[in-house]
Image (spheres, helix red, strand yellow):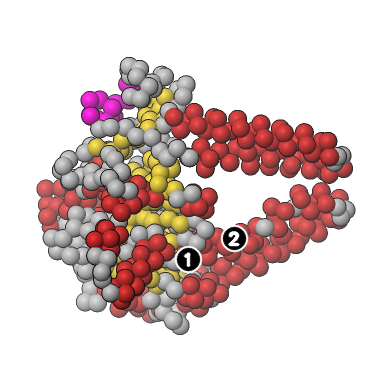
Amino acid sequence: MTAPGTAPTGPEPDSAAGSAPADRTSADASPADSGSAAPRHRTHPITPLVTGWKVVVGVIAVITAQNVAQLADEFTVRRALIGLGVLLVVILVSIVLSALSWWFTTYAVDEDGVSLHHGMISRSREYAPRARIESVSIERPLLARLLGLAKVRVEVAGGGESYLDIEYVSSARAEELRRGILEVAAGASAANARPDIDAPPAGGAAAADPSATSAASEPSQAGGAAGEQHGDRLEELLYDGVTDGELIAKIPTERLVRSLARDLGFLVGIVMSIVGVGVAIALGIWQEGFSIAILVALAPTVIAVPKYVFGRIDSGWGFVSRYTERGLRMRRGLANTRTDNIAAGRIQRFDLRRPFLWRGPGWTAVSVTVAGIDDDDENGATSVLPVGTREELRGTLGRLSAPLGTEDDLATLEHLLMAPVRELTGLRTPVRWFWIARRTELSLLLPGALVHRSGIVSRKLSIVPRERIQELRLEDGPLARRLGILDLHVEGAGDSLLLENLRREDALALHAVLAADARSLRRYRDRDRWPRPALAPVGGGTDGAAADSAAAEVETSGNAPGAGAMTPRPEQER
C-alpha cells in the first residue's frame, strides 16, 4: 500500500535518532518533510504487543496445517515441552521485531497534511496532502479495544488502497487526531487546525472530557443531574464517543437480526455454506477416515459458517449515524468497532438496496462510493445505512445527496424501488431475447442524477449525481450493430456504472447530454453554485464548500445549469 507522496528512501532515522535525512526522489515531496516544524510522534508503547501476535499465530498455523497428523501420532511430553520452548522464542523474537518497527515509526500532522515514516533498514515515507484526504476513520479491533487502543485510518483520493494508517494510539488520542486531521482537510488555519494534536491534554482524562471537569467543579449538584451525566457517559462509552451532532439513524439490535432473517441472499448463502461444509467433512472422513488429525484439518471449514454469520451481525451491530459539521459520522461493530466520517462533497455514487422481504416494513440499505475508499464489504466503511426506515433514509440522503430535481425525491425513489419495471418510464433494452434484463433493468435521467434500476429478488437503485460524471465510453460490436444496441459506461472518480444494451439512438442521445454535464456541471470557478444536499445546514460546517473545493483538485472541473430529463423513445421490440 502506498499513499500519494510515498517514496522509499535509504536509512533515515527520524528526529529522535538524530541522523541527517536522505535525498528525496518523489516528485510529491511532503511539506512535513521539507522544512515543516511539526513535531513527530510515535504510536502507543504497547503497540508491539498488539501487532506481534499476528506473527505467532501465522507460525503456529503453518506448522499445524502441514504436520498436524504427524504431530498427533508422535506426541510426547518431551516434544511438547520443546515445542513450547520454540514457541516462546518465536514470541520473544516477534515482540522484539515489533518493538524495533515501533521505534522507527513516527507520524506528524500539520496544516499541509499527514505524514508517516516507518522502516528500519529501508525507510519509507507516506504522505497524505490535505487536499486529497477523503475521510478519517477510527478502527478498534477486539484486542486493541481491550487495551484501550485504536487505529486511525486516513483515506486518500487515488487508487483503491490509498490510505495511511496510524496504529495504534490511545482512544482519546485517536479522537484528537481525527478532529485535527478533518480540520486540516477542511482548510482551517494553522492556529485552529490542530487542537490538542501535538500533546495529550494536561490533566489526563479529566481535561480531555469536559463533562468530567464539569462534574468535578460542581460536586454539590443533585443526584438527578449526576445520574443524567452518568447516562451520558455510558452512552458515550457504548457508542465510542459518537454522541455529538444531529441523530440521523440508530439501528436497534432487533431490527438488525430481523433484517438478516429476511434477507434471502444471506439465507441462501448460509444454506450453501452449510451444504459445502457438510460435503467437505464427508469427503475428508471418507478418504482419510475418522481421526483427530482430520478434524483439526477441517476446523477452518467448520467455523466458516459461524464466522460469516457473526461477521454480518458484527458489521451492523450498534450502528448509529449523526450529522456533524464535518459530515456524516457513523459507528458500528460488536467485537471489532469502527467509526467513520464521510463528507457529502466526496460522494460519487449512491446505491440503494431493498431485498424482497424488506418491502413490507419498508427497510432500505444505502451504500456510497467515495474516491479513494475501497471497501467490498456491504456493511463496511461505505455503508451509510445498513438497514433503515423511510425516515432514516430521508434523513441520510437529505444530508448527503444533492436534490434529484423532482417534486418529492423520496417518493420518486420509493416508486422506483417498489414498482415493476414495466410500469416505469425510462430507457431499457429493446432486444426481445434479453427478456430478464427487459423486466429488471431500467435507466432514467432525472434533472439532478442518472438512476439505474436492477435486480430481481433484491432490487437495487444506483444513483450517480450528474455533476460527478467524469468520463463516458460507448462500446460497440458486430452483434450490437446487428441488434441496434450500444453499451454506455459512465465513469466517476473511482467508480463505473454500466448501462447495457440500450437502443443506439437512446444511448447516443444520453451520451450527448451526459457529456455536456461532464464539461459544464462542476466548474471550479462556479463552486458557490454547486448542488448541495437539501437538508444540510446552509453556511454551517465545513464539509460543504471547503470539502468540495478540495475535492475539485482531484476531480473533473465543471458547473452550469443541468440539462433536462430525457424522454425515451417509444419502445420497439426486436
Q: Residue reaching furthest bottom?
A: 360
Does the segment drawn in magenta span residue 373?
no
Residue 484 in sight: no
Identify the residue position indicated by label 2 in the image: 308
Which x, y percent locates residue 38?
25, 32
Inspect this view and state whether residue 77 appears: yes
Q: Between marks 1 and 2, how big is the CA–CA gap?
A: 14 Å
x and y percentages locating residue 37 in the rendered image? 23, 29
- Residue located beneath label 1 in the image: 317
Q: Nearer the viewer, residue 542 or 145?
A: 145
Residue displayed at 42% across by 24% down: 123
How far from the left and from the top, in percent, is residue 7? 37, 27
Q: Amino acid at mark 1?
A: Trp
Examine the residues drawn in magenta and state their main secondary structure. Answer: loop
Where residue 383 sits in the image (x, y, percent)? 41, 61
SS under mark 2: helix
Q: Quadrant of the N terminus?
A: top left
Up-down: is 262 above or below 31?
below
- When the figure is inspected, residue 309 is found, relative to residue 410, above or below; the finding is above
Q: Which residues are magenta?
A: 24-37
350 and 483: which is toward the camera: 350
Rendered image quadrant of residue 380: bottom left
Left or right: 477 as drawn, with respect to 526: right
Residue, x 28% and y 32% (percent of image)?
39
The amino acid type of the residue labelled 2 equals: Tyr
* Disc 1 secondary structure class: loop
